[in-house]
Image: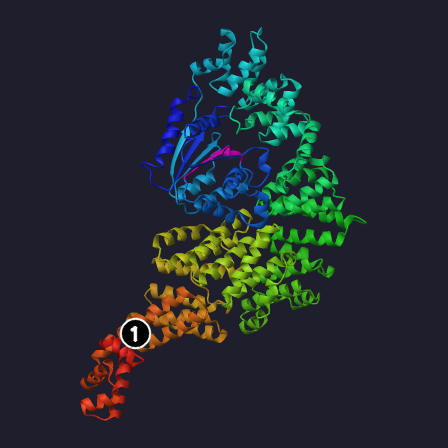
Amino acid sequence: MLLGRAAEVHRISAWLDSATSEYSGPLQFLEIAGSIGVGKSTLVTSALHRRRSRNETVVVCRGSRSAQVSPLSAVQPLISELLNEDRARLLDLSYIGRIARDCAQQLGAKPLVLVIDDTQWIDAASTEFLRLFLRRPARAHRSVIAIHRPDQAPHELLEEARSLGAHIEQLFLDVLDDAAIREIATGITPAQTELVVATAAGNPLFASTLTSVFRRFADSTSIDEALDLARSHRTTILQSVVMADIESLPREVRDVVFALAVLDRRSPAEIAAVLGIPDASVQASLDTLIGTGLLDPNPQLTLHPLVTHSAVMNAEPALLRRLHRTVLDLPGHTPLSSATHLSALGPHATADERRRLIDSARLAIGSDPATVVKWLAPLAEATRSPASAHDHEAAILLSRAELLSGRVREAVDRLRTMAEGLQAAADGPAPDSLLSQIRVLLARGLRMLGHPEAAIDVLETHLDDADPALVMEHIALQTLTDAPVSRALIRRLIARDELRYRAAALSFEVISNLNQGLIHEARDLFRELPPLVTSLPPEDAVEIIDAIASAAWAAYLLDDFGSGIDFASMGLRISRRFGHGDISSNLGTALSFSLLARGRFGEAELAAEEAIEDAVRFGSPDFIAMALSGLVQSAMWRRDTAELEGLSARMDEAPTPSVAWWRRTVETNAARLTAVLGHPATVRPSLHPHDASIAYRHADAALVALTEGHPHEARALLSTGLDWAEKFDLGSQRALILTMQAELLEQSGNDLETAVELSRRAADIFDRLHMPAHLARARRTQSAASAELSRTGVSALTKREREVAELAANGLSNKEIAETLVISPRTVEEHIAKALKKTGLSSRTGLAKLFG
């Protein structure tokens, strides 16, 4: 049993057992907090060791300071266990949400015990992965143990667990009592033992290291240096004591410590290769480290983070660079794992090493821009005035990563400095191309800071350069207003006679026309887009990613939901692959809206939630409320009132979009939500301008009027909305209003024949547009109105009409009915026609069902 921790080991074991006994939920979460060196990891290892015969998947993940600069490094053990794939290849081909989904599916029905050690150091991509992984439905219980320092809890993971209804417990690992510390301080004099007890203050790691000092200097009667350090922060004490321990080791053993710190994994073969010493020497050194307490006996664990940090902070920089370079020569490295070592070289990196680091950064920027900042910042610091093409590329990539990770002000300042430097230089590497990239990023940064006018100024000043990136950024800014885009700029793009720029020009012009109410013109232009956009290779498509987002929205507004899904899905793949996370929330929201129209609610909700996460993560607040609107629509279709109440609160907290047509979309969805929930209307749909969604907004305004008890106003709004939908030939909006009009008539019991006809027309449109949920709604209304019409119609039949109808329902022909009732066949025809009209039926089959 672990020294002094019997009760804690028993509690963890019992907690794990509870997942299969009285605890019946799919997820339980245990926080274990404690100070540095208090034994958190060893405690959990001991508890898990007692369960080694259980039929469950046990995975230990760990954050670390060195591995923090590699996306998904913390959860690599889980990904490898479940998918047997390298994280770099997965990031290149997929997206974190998809990796999490695949891992959850692969887990299957086998219980999972997931330990996340040092959660205060896990990388952002790993945090994102864990949240999405936990969110996926599970067929067996999952037990998560999160180990962290005091006051450094994994709040994002805890919030996710709470939202999933997880059973959460906390365990604070306190210091050991004096008796336990005395059991650690063996092999030294009683006086030295008391010094250890007094100075360690219950910390087992500190006690072990102080004991090691006394064992090495057996004649010492004091540790004045340690006692002096005791007045400073405990981390400083521990680092100093650890370094004293390391420095006392033989040279070969010290080298093994430094190799372990650089490798961040316990691989004797790799250590031998890095140091160029025999395997036996490595194993002997590892045994020595275990004996000193610097290394855990468990072969699955590497150095304690404190030992790693102390070694790295105190090693000779030249030695660390040599070790990092040697590690890079080992087989099996991926761009992401290499980047950790390349970034450690800082300004000493060669041109080839900088090139490799830039390639890794380009791969990771879409999933973890904060990590890219850490990788590239040392290079930028070393080259404050970029000179080479690599220097400029690194600085531009760093600026993009800063924009994506919320460091917008730093990026804007850097980009301005770079632009001024290039403009002042007499010559330089491709200055026009570089300046265009810098100005486009600078304009985006200024837009993110809420200065669109300044962004336009940056672009307009240099539009004569004819660079397509500048032109497209300028047009993209124009599409965010209610003003039409510049036809001159559109012509400049088309004049380049390249498919990607034609696709961009058409996309921007279509969305502008839709905003201006030029729907027929937009539809004519749009017909060319689907084959054009989807034929672009990724390397071309990434250059027009903003235009692809416009195309996705245009497809949705023009009822081409299949193309909307294709455009948005394609754009998301490209934005994540090439590091354009700033547009992913736009694309994800567009995807959710088209999926909703197709009745694919689960996929739509996932796309909307990911869009919200991307909006927060990459600084695109306008799309938080837009994506929430998608979730609102899905919850309405599912008739989930509790979910709608929660979404209402989230909508209230979300920032109001700054872009006019996005704001109108959010406002009309908010108005619909308050009407459905019966809340007082705090916002009303705007009935101007007459853009592509004007009929939708009239429909929502009518719903608000009905809720407030104004049916006449509601009918007038629906009538006006229908006029707009028919004028613009917008099928889904026309069908929606027809359905609402039919519902009003059916509910009032007035003019049921018209209700049947309106709902039938709506159903035909929804069927043609492949909108199954909307189609079901229209058919429900048609069925209800038909049933009521039939019921009331039968009572309205004359005696003779009923006799004829019943005989027809029994399968008699007109001639047979005429002979039976002794009337003419023509009279039979007239009675049947009247019976069909009064009952709202269309055939004798309907009569058979009515009278059957």
Q: Which of the 4 image quarters holds residue 817?
A: bottom left
Which residue is tagged 1? 786
Magenta span contains residue 688 = no
Question: Helix, strand, or loop for circle 1?
Answer: helix
Q: Quadrant of the C terminus?
A: bottom left
User: Is residue 751 visible in the rendered structure shown here?
Assistant: no
User: Is residue 212 visible in the rendered structure shown here?
Assistant: yes
Of 531 and 58, which appears nearest the observer?
58
Magenta span contains residue 115 = yes
Residue 837 drawn above or below residue 695: below
Q: Seen from this angle, which residue lies furthest right?
A: 426
Q: Residue 220 location in percent, x, y?
A: 58, 7
Q: Quadrant of the N terminus?
A: top left
* Left or right of 402, for residue 785: left
Residue 575 drawn above or below residue 303: below
Of 1 and 556, which appears nearest the observer?
1
Image point (23%, 83%), residue name = 805
Q: Residue 809 location in percent, x, y?
A: 24, 80
Q: Which of the 4 image quarters holds residue 314?
A: top right
* Left or right of 400, for residue 35: left
Query: Which residues, given as a range, are shown in magenta?
Result: 111-121
Of 446 and 473, which appears nearest the observer?
473
Image point (57%, 73%), residue name = 524
Give the amino acid type for the residue marked by disc 1 in the picture.
Ser
Q: Residue 743 location in percent, x, y?
A: 33, 70
* Left or right of 438, for residue 4: left
Q: Residue 305 location in percent, x, y?
A: 55, 28
Of 8 and 593, which appears nearest the observer?
8
Numbered marks: total: 1
Q: Residues within 10 Å of mark 1 (few under 14, many from 20)?
A: many
Color encoding of the figure: rainbow
